[in-house]
């Protein structure tokens, strides 16, 4: 059977489902205002919005420059004070939207980072337990010769996360 057409193993499917549930929880925890801010930020970040903004500014300037020659009243003659004020207001709101979006993303990144750290510590503890059990089996097996394996003994001990962090800090100082 082709590996690409084979259905995923149950544990893989369960892991994918759990991640989908975590994502759904994050979406469910998002307030309506956060949804609105995210939608506006996503919309404003599209290249088509940039093109429309550029077209708007060029049309504004072109109209106000050409209006006197066409016998029309320029509502914002050079140096385009209204355009400058409008651009400043748009820039202010865009900055606030970006900051709000970044704050939400940083919150989610912190949660993901904490989850990753906790899963790493748990995995390290599980691996240490497996090594310990393998070493115990090796010592008790009549087929295998008994010998002292210091590295395996060291690896069978779970690492203390605080000690590891302290060593990392000292090493980088």
Image (cartoon, rainbow, N blue to C red):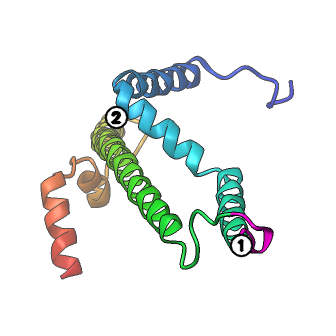
Nearest-to-viewer mark from 2 and 1? 1
Please give the range of residues in magenta: 66-72
Mark 1 lies on residue: 68
Closer to the camera, 113 or 163? 113
Image position of 123 with respect to 103: above or below: above
Of labels 2 and 1, earlier in sequence is 1
Q: Is the N terminus in the top left, top right, bottom left or bottom right quadrant? A: top right
Q: Where is residue 87 in the image (x, y as percent from the top left)?
A: 49, 63
Residue 128 left/right relative to 88: left
Say if the magenta span includes residue 147: no
For the point 67% across and 58% down, the residue is 56
Where residue 35 appears, x then y in whole percent? 43, 31
> The C terminus lies in which quarter of the figure?
bottom left
Say which of 118 and 123 sits in front: 118
- Viewer-proximal residue, 145 or 105? 105
Residue 138, label in figure: none
Secondary structure beneath dot 1 equals helix
**Residue under label 2:** 137
Q: Which residue corresponds to the image point at 40% horizontal and 46% vertical from the top-left?
A: 101
Give me the residue at 35% from left, 41% from top.
108
Circle 2 packing at 10 Å, graded few (<14), some (14-19), many (20+), is few
Q: Quadrant of residue 61?
A: bottom right
User: Where in the figure is residue 133, as x and y percent of width and height?
Assistant: 31, 35
């Amino acid at each position: 059977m082709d590996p690409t057409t084979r259905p995923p193993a149950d544990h893989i499917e369960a892991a994918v489902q759990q991640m989908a549930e975590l994502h759904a929880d994050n979406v469910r925890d998002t307030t309506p205002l956060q949804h609105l801010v995210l939608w506006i930020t996503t919309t404003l970040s599209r290249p088509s919005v940039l093109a429309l903004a550029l077209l708007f500014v060029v049309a504004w300037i072109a109209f106000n420059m050409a209006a006197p020659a066409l016998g029309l009243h320029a509502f914002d003659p050079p140096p385009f004070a209204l355009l400058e004020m409008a651009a400043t207001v748009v820039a202010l709101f865009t900055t606030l939207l970006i900051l709000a979006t970044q704050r939400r993303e940083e919150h989610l990144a912190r949660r993901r980072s904490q989850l990753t750290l906790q899963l790493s510590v748990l995995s390290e503890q599980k691996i240490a337990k497996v090594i310990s059990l393998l070493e115990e089996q090796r010592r008790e097996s009549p087929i295998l010769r008994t010998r002292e394996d210091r590295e395996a003994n060291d690896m069978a001990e779970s690492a203390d996360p605080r000690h590891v962090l302290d060593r990392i800090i000292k090493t980088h100082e």
